[in-house]
Image: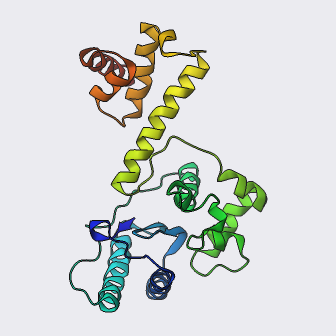
């Protein structure tokens, strides 16, 4: 994921987004790598790439340098265009790959740009729907669609939700973490038929705290606040969880 400096909307219109895609296509002709999914937002870009770590750095540097030169020229500006280095994480299994792909395609929905991810012009969902992809790898497209059986199941998959936190802007990650925590609390309440806060016994609160601790997403103090427990008690529960997992 790469982002405009100071949250600047460096891909703010169709002309700029289209130029970015052309740059990526040109670099694909220079370096052999596979794109599985992408989404261009106004101020950042998501890419799912199949490549080793060494080449990934080269690829992202080329994208950033070429686009920065173009952007500075057309905007008649100087200086940095992107904020810091690109952010990345390894995708270790197929389940996480599919979840990341779904998250990338749903970025415009999560940002309230559209209600329908299929309607967004600047993501790879259009290449999955069309017969001939331009950016994404034909082999990966075929394998992914085949794993769902048909295109309808692939589309339905995009309406599902998981508790993974995928790489995004810092602001979006904070929002997503909050969603995961709230979803976890709601699921626990439904599972245990807890209709109101007063229905939570001390045992329920501690059990829920253990579950949230295992997510490893928020601070001890925040867990204590959410579960209505003391910070010291949550610290003890965290230590007990750590011993249990050893």
Occupied quadrant, residue 131: bottom right
Occupied quadrant, residue 136: bottom right
From the viewer's perspective, tell me whether residue 209 is left or right of residue 239.
right
* Residue at the limit of the structure toward the left, as seen here: 79
Image quarter (top left, top right, bottom left or bottom right) of the N terminus: bottom left
Occupied quadrant, residue 218: top left
- Judging depth in this view, the residue of 129 and 50 nearest the camera is 129
Percent x, y for residue 84? 25, 67
Q: Name the residue: 75% across, 54% down.
A: 153
From the viewer's perspective, tell me whether residue 149 is left or right of residue 60.
right
Is residue 110 placed above or below 82 in the rendered structure? Answer: above
Image quarter (top left, top right, bottom left or bottom right) of the C terminus: top left
Q: Name the residue: 65% across, 60% down.
A: 116
Q: Name the residue: 27% across, 26% down.
A: 221
Q: Name the residue: 49% across, 57% down.
A: 111
Percent x, y for residue 143? 68, 64
Is residue 224 placed above or below 34 in the rendered structure? Answer: above
Q: Is residue 246 visible?
A: no
């Amino acid at each position: 994921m790469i982002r405009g400096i100071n949250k600047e909307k460096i891909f703010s219109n169709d002309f700029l987004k289209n130029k970015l895609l052309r740059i990526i296509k040109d670099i694909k002709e220079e370096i052999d790598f596979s794109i599985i999914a992408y989404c261009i937002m106004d101020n950042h870009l998501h890419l799912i790439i199949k490549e080793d770590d060494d080449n990934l750095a080269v690829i992202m540097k080329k994208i950033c340098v070429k686009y920065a030169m173009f952007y500075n020229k057309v905007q008649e500006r100087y200086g940095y265009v992107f904020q810091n280095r690109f952010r990345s994480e390894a995708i270790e299994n197929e389940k996480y790959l599919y979840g990341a792909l779904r998250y990338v395609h749903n970025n415009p929905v999560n940002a309230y740009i559209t209600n329908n991810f299929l309607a967004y012009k600047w993501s790879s969902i259009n290449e999955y729907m069309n017969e001939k992809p331009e950016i994404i790898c034909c082999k990966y497209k075929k394998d992914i669609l085949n794993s769902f059986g048909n295109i309808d199941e692939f589309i339905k998959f995009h309406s599902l939700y998981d508790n993974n936190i995928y790489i995004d802007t810092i602001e979006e990650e904070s929002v997503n973490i909050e969603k995961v925590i709230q979803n976890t609390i709601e699921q626990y309440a439904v599972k245990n038929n807890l209709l109101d806060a007063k229905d939570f016994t001390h045992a329920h609160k501690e059990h829920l705290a253990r579950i949230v601790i295992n997510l490893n997403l928020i601070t001890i103090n925040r867990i204590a606040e959410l579960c209505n427990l003391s910070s010291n008690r949550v610290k003890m529960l965290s230590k007990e969880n750590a011993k249990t997992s050893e």
